[in-house]
Image (cartoon, rainbow, N blue to C red):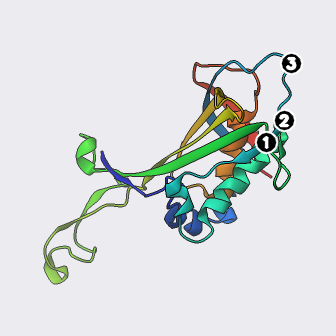
């Protein structure tokens, strides 16, 4: 399988997210993410106030891309009980977020039975590029691309810098997904907060 990574570490998420629209999500209403969570949130400690900390590379992200991703994370954090820190106030925790979308273009040689009436196939007579009046044979690839999407959050105590909670979510699909899917993945990552469950498990989130 050929892989081509779209530069989507939230420092350059534009190509996939800008191209995706809500219409691309119309075919499904539930996003199922594979989630893993880590850490031991202090017993009795409330979620508290937070700020999202941008890494230097995220500060250099073009346009409003980083802001779009942060908006998805804000929704999940506030649903989990966190509140944005007031301007100028010291937050209880600092949150770092990250994500990426990787696109895989299938090669016909990945499948020993690659010839079939759908997907990848040879172009023959009747196809542009076929023999006769159409010229020589050539390869046509009609397999859809596959995407792997990942998001993650790391929550640290502001005073000590100690990591308190880490969450990751992963999905696969044949589209980049767009903002609604990314928001659903952040929601899945924090759905069980403050409980930590290291082993990967499925979490369902209904799309609006």
Vertical placement of 115 versus 94: above or below?
Answer: below
Q: Is mark 2 on a helix, strand or loop?
A: loop
179 with respect to 5 (left or right): right
Where does the image place residue 77, in percent across and percent down from the top left? 77, 42
Q: Is mark 1 on a helix, strand or loop?
A: loop
The one of 68 and 128 positioned closer to us in this rendering: 68
Where does the image place residue 81, in percent across and percent down from the top left? 85, 36
Question: Residue at the location (53% across, 69% down)?
Answer: 62
Where does the image place residue 123, in percent across and percent down from the top left? 24, 66
Label 2 and label 3: CA atoms lie apart by 12 Å
Crowding at label 3, few (<14), some or many (≥20) Cα neighbours within 10 Å? Answer: few
The one of 147 and 113 positioned closer to us in this rendering: 147
Indicate the quadrant where residue 194 lies.
Answer: top right
The one of 30 and 70 positioned closer to us in this rendering: 70
Q: Name the residue under label 3.
A: 44
Q: Mark 2 points at which residue?
A: 48
> How many badges with numbers are in the image?
3
Is residue 27 something one can see in this rendering? no
Question: Residue at the location (43% across, 58% down)?
Answer: 7
The one of 174 and 44 positioned closer to us in this rendering: 44
Given contact means CB atoms under 8 Å apart, are the residues at marks 2 and 1 in contact? Answer: yes
Question: Residue at the location (22% across, 46% down)?
Answer: 109
Where does the image place residue 196, in percent across and percent down from the top left? 68, 20
Q: Name the residue under label 1.
A: 91
162 with respect to 192 (left or right): left
Discs 3/1, front: 1
Given contact means CB atoms under 8 Å apart, are the residues at marks 3 and 1 in contact? Answer: no
Q: Residue reaching furthest bottom? A: 133
Give the mark nearer the N terminus: 2 vs 1.
2
Label 3 and label 1: CA atoms lie apart by 18 Å
Is residue 51 something one can see in this rendering? yes
Give the mark nearer the N terminus: 3 vs 1.
3
């Amino acid at each position: 399988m050929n892989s081509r990574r779209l530069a989507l570490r939230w420092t350059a998420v534009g190509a996939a997210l800008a191209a995706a629209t809500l219409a691309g999500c119309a075919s499904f209403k539930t996003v199922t993410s594979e989630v893993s969570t880590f850490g031991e949130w202090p017993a009795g400690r409330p979620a508290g106030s937070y700020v999202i900390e941008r890494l230097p590379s995220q500060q250099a992200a073009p346009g409003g891309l980083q802001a779009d991703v942060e908006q998805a994370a804000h929704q999940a954090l506030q649903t989990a009980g966190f509140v944005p820190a007031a301007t100028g106030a010291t937050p209880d925790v600092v949150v770092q977020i990250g994500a990426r979308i990787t696109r895989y273009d299938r090669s016909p040689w990945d499948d020993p039975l690659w010839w079939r009436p759908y997907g990848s196939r040879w172009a023959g007579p009747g196809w542009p590029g076929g023999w006769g009046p159409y010229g020589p044979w050539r390869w046509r690839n009609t397999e859809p691309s596959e995407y792997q999407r990942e998001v993650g959050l790391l929550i640290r105590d502001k005073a000590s810098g100690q990591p308190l909670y880490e969450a990751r979510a992963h999905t696969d699909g044949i589209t980049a997904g767009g903002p609604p899917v990314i928001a659903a993945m952040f929601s899945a990552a924090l759905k069980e907060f403050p409980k930590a469950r290291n082993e990967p498990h499925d979490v369902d989130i209904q799309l609006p």
